[in-house]
Image: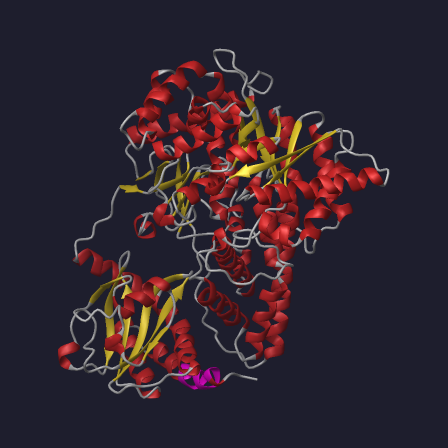
Amino acid sequence: MQSPAIRQALGILKKLRQITESSSDVAQKLADILKTIAETMQADAAVCYAVVDKNYLDLFSTYGLKKEDQKQIRLRFGEGAIGKIASDRCSLALNKLWTYPKYAKSSELNGKDYKSFVGVPILQWNRTVGVLAIYYCAETEYTDVDVELLETIAMFLAEIMSSAEMAEYKKSLSKARGIATRDRLKGVSLSKGYGIGTAVVHRRHQSVTNIFAEDKNKELLRLKVAHQQMNDDLDAKFDTTKLGIGEHVDILEAYRMFAKDKGWYNKIETNINSGLSAEAAVERAYEDMWNRLSGSNDIYLKERLHDLRDVSDRLLSYLLGENKQSKDIDAQDIIVVAQTMGPAELMDYDYSRIRGLILEDGTPTMHVAIVAKTLNIPVLSKIRGVLAEVHSGQTVAIDGNEGWVYVNPSKQVAEGFRKKAMEQAELAKRWAALRNLPTVTKDKQKIGLYINVGLPMDFDYIEATNCDGVGLYRTEIPFMASEKMPDVQRQVMYYKDLIDKSGDKKVIFRSLDVGSDKLLPYWAYGGEANPAIGWRSIRITLDRRAILRQQIKAFLQATVGHELNVMFPMISDLEEFEDAKETLMLELEKEKKHGAKVPAKVNAGLMIEVPSVLFQLDKILPKADFISVGTNDLAQFVFACDRGNPKLLERYDVLSVPFLSVMKMIVDKAKQYGVYCSVCGEMASNPLEAMALIGLGYRNLSANGAAFGRVKEMIRSINTKEISDYMENLLKSSRTMVRSQLISYANDHGIEIY
């Protein structure tokens, strides 16, 4: 049964379609369309803003305005009610416009004359291309049907706002304002390295033009066929492509599961049953999810929205027949340029030829950035307007170390980049050659260098790197990749596989660390305002003790005859650690009581990542067999800084005296009590930061497999006595940020940090 908004929209969209077919002038089209909208919705005025360049909107077309309001208006994203709609990509209905806190009185329409307002974003590729709004002189109450009707019309307008005619208009307007293109663009580096190649601008699906359908059964069948084709192709792509090993494989596996999510598919079916075409139903399902989740600070939910956008676009390409379009590029070396993209979209290209990735919007936690980094592809982000300045076919050079993009570089600059890219390839070969060399410093100090693993694909790193062992096994990864809770037998299979691959090497199991940005699809989670510091990790498993006991039982059975090291995450106080350790020991005694074989030795440790533990180390360390510092969360909590927030990317630095002092205190306390201490966070995977850790006194590091060679080369080029003396002086200095000093020290002493 069709919804009221859709029934009403059917009539108005027929009129709008006639208007678009009768005129080729984009300005005239919009003027006639706004008149039809205003008359149909009995509004006193209607306006359409267009995003012309970067983060600004221009009042492009109007209907019904008073003469004094017919002026050129330009608004920034976030400015006024219109700017708020553009930046948040959410609809807004106000019956007392002048009282709205963000109302831009000096820039927007006269609030004394227009008292009520409904505005909706015009979206394409998940980016705002315009804003449609209607105004009323009287205070008016709005219903969900009114807002939904305007949102449906906005879907139709997206086609016009993204047309070639509109592009020409924007270009001429930008030229008239003197906005010139640049040959060098500054961005934020998400993955270091150098690359040069031919630009390939990645465009997402075209606008949905067929919004309504008369035969819902036909649309449901189209959806079913497209959905099956998409998943079959994803299965084939991820099974046959030589992706190697690493975290990128985990992400692509999770993406494949997301594409098969029944809840998302059911929402699309519901939209079709209400009267929408299959394409429009997919778009509406995404917009509904965006409206509900975009305001969340949860990193997991934000990344889930990125994946949902990517999966939605992929499904649309099958519905529209665009999936047959080849991504084959003539150029041998390519630089992919995109507003944003998902991990599977990156894999649509021949990734062996990708020399760089440039994103207009991106954060280090974005799945596509993680996949690219693992594949040693340099990535830059936060370059506003890059799609307007870089075009397919241009030569582009990317400096992932300093964060620069060079468009059509000179012959001299291009040669310099090619040389750097070749040097980078030689470095990779050099790191591989380190495999059989000991991980010792120049003054013969042994540094334990371990790896972090998740899915079984990571286990190959143990042999490939000849590491000292596994410093962190993320046991939650198999839970997240499973459609239901793994039972004890299945967990034993996971853990025993790792033990078999590790042989006699040390393995540290982290107990289930879920919640916050790692949600299990088969668990119900209540909404939390601050999930990163909410019900997560050890707090969940202590509350749901049966889950912890089952996992410990699996640990014990999988490590029979070996040493078992269990590390509990997110410990906040002594009582939590004692409670978790007691559960471990009770399960061990149960196994013995039943005559079962047990590990040769059982050790209990904890992650140091909650600041409150720092003040309890004298009580906790005597009861712990080992500790490992999780620098990702520890830094986030010490600085009260959301590590997934792009606005804070460069605001706080772990290479600052305050944070390094915290790290120094931890390792000194561990030495005092004779407790094994390691670092398993991102600091251990960055050569410069790992150098600083060694200078502070850390002798055990656990890095990501892809970073192992870089960190090992740094270790073999360092003198521990010299770096320790230097770090001691740095911590006593009046400086706060010491990254530049550490870089200079490394360069002066021939330490390999790149």
Residue 640 on the magenta segment: no
Query: On screen, 704 above or below 14?
Result: above
Query: On screen, 370 above or below 601?
Result: below
Let me know if residue 375 appears in the view: no
Given residues 193 and 681, the one toward you in this image is: 681
Q: Main secondary structure of the magenta part?
A: helix
- Residue projecting furthest to the top: 443
> Which picture quadrant has residue 29?
bottom left
Residue visible at 73% across and 45% down in the picture: 491
- From the top left corner, tell me how far across and down residue 325 is, in percent: 52, 55
- Residue projecting furthest to the front: 619
Which quarter of the rendering shows the C terminus? top left
> Which picture quadrant has residue 217?
bottom right
Given residues 364 and 321, the one toward you in this image is: 364
Residue 10 on the magenta segment: yes
- From the top left corner, tell me how far across and down residue 6 is, in percent: 47, 82
Identify the magenta region: 5-14
Residue visible at 27% across and 73% down in the picture: 100
Residue visible at 26% across and 85% down in the picture: 44
Given residues 186 and 12, the one toward you in this image is: 186
- From the top left corner, tell me how far across and down residue 541 is, in percent: 63, 50
Let me know if residue 161 appears in the view: yes
Taking 116 as reference, is 601 left or right? right
Given residues 414 and 90, the one toward you in this image is: 90
